[in-house]
Image: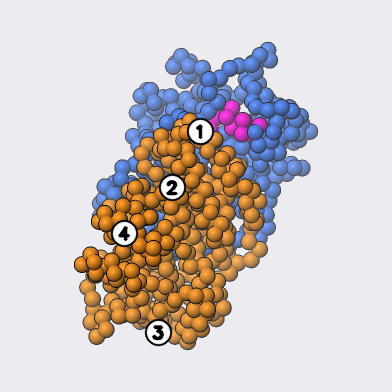
Chain colours: A blue, B orange
Amino acid sequence: MRLHELGEFGLIARIAEAVGAGQEPVVVGIGDDAAVLEAPSAGYLLVTTDAYLEGQHFRRQWLTASQIGWRAVGAALSDIAAMGGEALAVFVSAGLPSTEEAAFAEQLICAVHEAATEHGATLAGGDTCASPDRIYLDVVAVGQGQQPWLRSTAQPGDVLLVTDTLGGAAAALHLLESGTVQNADGLPPALRECFIRPTPQFAVARCLQQLPQPPCAIDISDGLVQDAAHIAEASAVALTIQAAHIPVAETCRQVATEAGADALRWALTGGEEYELLLALPRDSVEQALTLVEAEGVKLTEIGFVTAGKGVTVVDAAGNEIELDRGGWDHFASY
Amino acid sequence: MRLHELGEFGLIARIAEAVGAGQEPVVVGIGDDAAVLEAPSAGYLLVTTDAYLEGQHFRRQWLTASQIGWRAVGAALSDIAAMGGEALAVFVSAGLPSTEEAAFAEQLICAVHEAATEHGATLAGGDTCASPDRIYLDVVAVGQGQQPWLRSTAQPGDVLLVTDTLGGAAAALHLLESGTVQNADGLPPALRECFIRPTPQFAVARCLQQLPQPPCAIDISDGLVQDAAHIAEASAVALTIQAAHIPVAETCRQVATEAGADALRWALTGGEEYELLLALPRDSVEQALTLVEAEGVKLTEIGFVTAGKGVTVVDAAGNEIELDRGGWDHFASY
């Protein structure tokens, strides 16, 4: 059955049935003019939106309907984790071609719910409309936090740290774009899982609540160097990234070697990593390493903050490495 | 200057400057991973998303950038008003062609902020990305309310009421689609204002807080009959709409007469009205009329609720009027 046969309200009814009544704090979920949520009793509310557009953020032939949904939610929830928050609810606005199979739309939106549930949230609403050609998703994530982690609080003397390893998403993208693999299911196992199901760093957000003060934080959605530049600008400081310390993913190195590409550059500028870049006072670093590693997550010191402005990447000898670009600018890169 | 010259972060910086720091409850607005809002101290949080897609919801040649922004926000905030809420913050996810003038994007997004401000909210964040061709907007509205107004609480014996007049949006759409006028600025004054700046019924939401119990409510975004059907289904009741009582807009009658069309059908099935359809116990009607009319808003009794299912439209003699469609279904109507 095609979407224009099922109709907008038929689709919404099917999704509402699959999702069910939702869980706390959702009082009224899918099906009214707006969702009703219990307000957090203390702390702050966090809200973010993340567009996920066919042709710009993904290609249809690379991903199944379910994988598209999982990736879109991972990107949106990562912004809540990067604020030191926990997830409450997710909403999805979906522009879908009327000629699309209804099952495709259902699988996509049910995957949004599954991914939200995996991270403690519920699909609480959204909007659907016909798009003439492309799939257009906008995922809204609502969360809560006690003390928001901002981009603007890095101080000279702080240490830069990054979670897990980098470059995996860029390596996956290379394999897909070069046609080495036909779709995400063809990726090497180590890349496949992180590409299909990017993990917002809620475990890190939770355990670092024990630090004496909230860290400066950003998630690496546009590429390490570019996101570092966002911290530098918002905090009015200079960031130095020590290239030799970057935890380049092993699979990224292998793929880069075969492709004759530079794994380090992929790790420095590849987008959609969803790892966290943190700036912490030197005297909090040991505690942070202990807390994060107890969660089974790797945390690596990769640089430092000084007075000044901008981001500099240096090699082991301290010489600057020039990069032709720092990451993604959506209007420039199209 | 084009968007690909200004770049994504150049555009965000300009918008952040135009919007400023935001107002309570926005603690951190545009420019971090997520917006930070103070949580409402009591009551519920309301969240809705509203897609607004070029070619589906509007045509570019009909509207200026600013008018596109105002209309998109009106539609989203109307859902908060229809829940009996007040507006707190607005977010906009915008897919825009890279070749578009940067000034167009700025005007559009600044209009989102202006429209939000008009209704007591702030533009607190969003996302921007390049769209290969069409403008795609998703407006997220966050509000709060003490007791949410639901679609599911209509009871047999209740009276149906509608705010203001109906059919204006359908008349405006007819003039635009038929080429009688070239764009929204060419519409007759009475239609122009409500088409360009649809008014969410926050005044009605506010004053009806004094009723002994929250009304059953929906906003008429898909057309009166179709939205009535949403109430009938959610409340498991039957709704009867008395055609002779429908407050058809005077300009709608004039345009329909000139077009040889049926003004009543426009009023019954035209979408994007953003008036409220309410179901109230008979003994609350007089109080509701007094409260709403004190706000300078017209409120008209147009039918009643009985046991049963579905929506019936009847003429003055009580005979059923057949309609070929009840309103908008986005997948079917494309």
Secondary structure category for the residue under label 2: helix
Using the numbered discs, state the Cα–Cα distance from disc 3 to disc 4 in whole angstroms: 35 Å
Say if mark 1 contacts mark 3, CB within 8 Å: no
Q: Nearer the viewer, residue B134 or A133?
A: B134
Q: Are marks 1 and 4 on the same chain?
A: yes
Instruction: Give, as a single range, the part of the protein colored magenta.
Output: A221-232
Say if mark 2 contacts mark 3, CB within 8 Å: no
In the figure, is residue B113 to the left or right of B300? right
Query: Disc 3 marks which amino acid?
Result: Gly
Q: Which residue is mark 2?
A: B65
Q: Are marks 1 and 3 on the same chain?
A: yes
Using the numbered discs, state the Cα–Cα distance from disc 2 to disc 3 in whole angstroms: 46 Å
Q: Quadrant of residue A268?
A: top right
Secondary structure category for the residue under label 4: helix
Q: Which residue is mark 3?
A: B157
Q: Is residue B334 above or below residue A51?
A: below
Q: Residues within 10 Å of mark 2 (few under 14, many from 20)?
A: some
Q: Is residue A139 above or below residue B321?
A: above
Counting residues from the start of the chain, the first of labels 2 and 3 encountered is: 2
Q: Residues within 10 Å of mark 4 (few under 14, many from 20)?
A: many
Using the numbered discs, state the Cα–Cα distance from disc 4 to disc 2 in whole angstroms: 18 Å
Q: Which residue is mark 1?
A: B6
